[in-house]
Amino acid sequence: MGGRGRRHGIEERLEVIALVDEAHRNGARRAEACKILEVSSRAVERWRVAGGGEDGRKGPKTPPPNKLSKVERKRLLKTVNSSKYRDLSPKQIVPKLADTGVYIASESTVYRVLRKEGLLNHRESSRPRVNSRPAPLVATGPNQVWSWDITFLPSPVKGMFFYLYMVMDVWSRKIVGWEVHSFESMELSSRMITRVCEEQGIDENQIYLHSDNGGPMKGATMLATLQKLGIVASFSRPQVSDDNPYSEALFRTLKYRPEYPRKPFASIEAAIDWVAGFVIWYNSQHLHSAIKFVTPDDRHYGYEETILRRRKAVYERAKKKTPNRWSGETRNWEPLKTVVLNPEKSSVEEAA
C-alpha cells in the first residue's frame, strides 16, 4: 500500500479498510494485518470513522527512500511470475531467493506489489482449502437425525471443568443420551453413542449423527464406532458454531435456567445430579417453542398430534363464541412435519 508515512488516496484507503476487515474475518488480528500493509492501525480506524475520508496524518509528501524503483519493481514481478516461482507464495519465494544469494525485497513488499498488480491469488499448486457448508439433513420423524456436542461445566478447581456430553434428536428435540465426565475423550464418546443406540433400539443405517470438528467427535475410535453401528457422520465447518445450531441452543437453555448454579459444582456427582434433573424437566415438562409448544417427549413418542388437535378445537370454539375478536384464521396448531439441519441459504431466507 505504499510505505509508512505515505499519504493515501481515498480509493487506496477504502482498499486498506477492506483488506484489514477481510483478514480479521479470516482470523487475523487487525494490528497484524495493518503491519503487513505497512499502515498504522490507528490511521485505519480514523479512515473507517470517516468512511474513507481525508487522510489526517501529517508526514512526508515525498516518496520514502526505500521505495522500489521502476527497474526493481519490474525485476520483482518478472522473478515472482517466472515458471520457477509462480506457484509459490511470497513467504516461500523470498527465502528460496536468499538461498541462491539473491535479495529483491521483503515478503511484505512482494505481497504489496502483487496485490497492487492484481496478482495476489492462490499461487500454490495445491488446492486451496474450502470449508463447505455441511449438506442439509432432513428429519421427518424421531431417530433419523441426531446432534451431539460437549460443553463445559465449572468445577471447584479453577481452570478445570467437568464435561457434559449430550445427544439430542433434531426432529423431536428430545435429549436421548448424556453423560458427565472429568475429561474429553473419543473413547468416552464412542461408548456413550453405542449405549444410546442400544437404548433407543437404533438399526444400522438409520441415524445421521451431526457434531462439530473436535477430537472426541472425529477421532479414529469414534469414527470406527460410527461405522460399526452403521451411523452416517456429519460435521460442522471448523470454527462455525451455527453449523450445529440445535446442540448450541440446547446448551444455552441449560445454562440460562434460573436454577443453574452460580457457583462451580462441588463435585462431579453434584454435576450429574443437576443435569439429571434438567433432562427430566427439558424432555417431559418444557413446552418447546420450536415444536408448537409441546414437550420433546410428547413429540418423540407421538402424542403431539392429539395435543395440538385439542388446542385447535379450543381456539375454534373461542372464535365461534366471539367472532368479532378474530380478524382471520385461528392460530396454526398443525404439527411441524419436517426439520432441516443446516438448510440451504435460500431455504433459510424463505423461512425468515
Image (tube, rainbow, N blue to C red):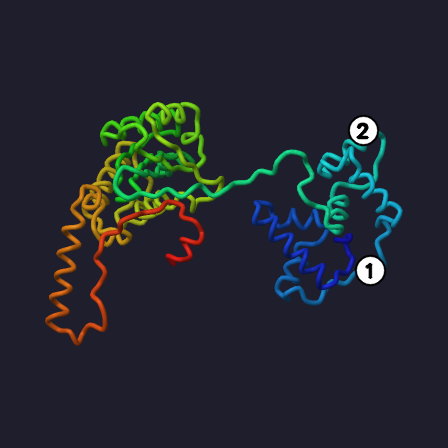
Q: Within 10 Å of the Cα at label 2, are there few (<14), some (14-19), or many (20+) other Cα atoms?
A: few
Q: How many marks?
A: 2
Tell me the mark number nearer the camera, choosing from 1 and 2: 2
- Amino acid type assigned to the residue bearing label 1 in the image: Pro
**266 vs 102, nearest the viewer:** 102
Point out which mark residue 60 bears. 1
The part of the image, by quadrant, that contains residue 145 is top left
185 up-or-down from 264: above or below: above
Tag 2, which secondary structure? helix
> Where does the image place residue 227, in percent across and percent down from the top left?
37, 25
- Amino acid type assigned to the residue bearing label 2 in the image: Asp
Marked residue nearer the N-terminal end (1 or 2): 1
Q: Which residue is mark 2?
A: 99
Residue furthest to the right in view is: 71
Q: Within 10 Å of the Cα at label 1, are there few (<14), some (14-19), or many (20+) other Cα atoms?
A: few
> Where does the image place residue 349, in percent across and percent down from the top left?
42, 57
Image quarter in which the C terminus is found? bottom left
Give the distance between the C-alpha atoms of the residues marked 1 and 2, in whole angstroms: 36 Å
**339 vs 248, nearest the viewer:** 339
> Residue drawn at (37%, 38%), measured in percent from left and top?
151
The part of the image, by quadrant, that contains residue 97 is top right
> Where does the image place residue 60, in percent across and percent down from the top left?
82, 60
Tag 1, which secondary structure? loop
326 up-or-down from 289: above or below: below
Q: Are marks 1 and 2 in contact (CB under 8 Å)?
A: no
> Where does the image place residue 178, in percent across and percent down from the top left?
29, 34
Q: In the rendered view, does 159 fall on the left or right side of 285?
A: right
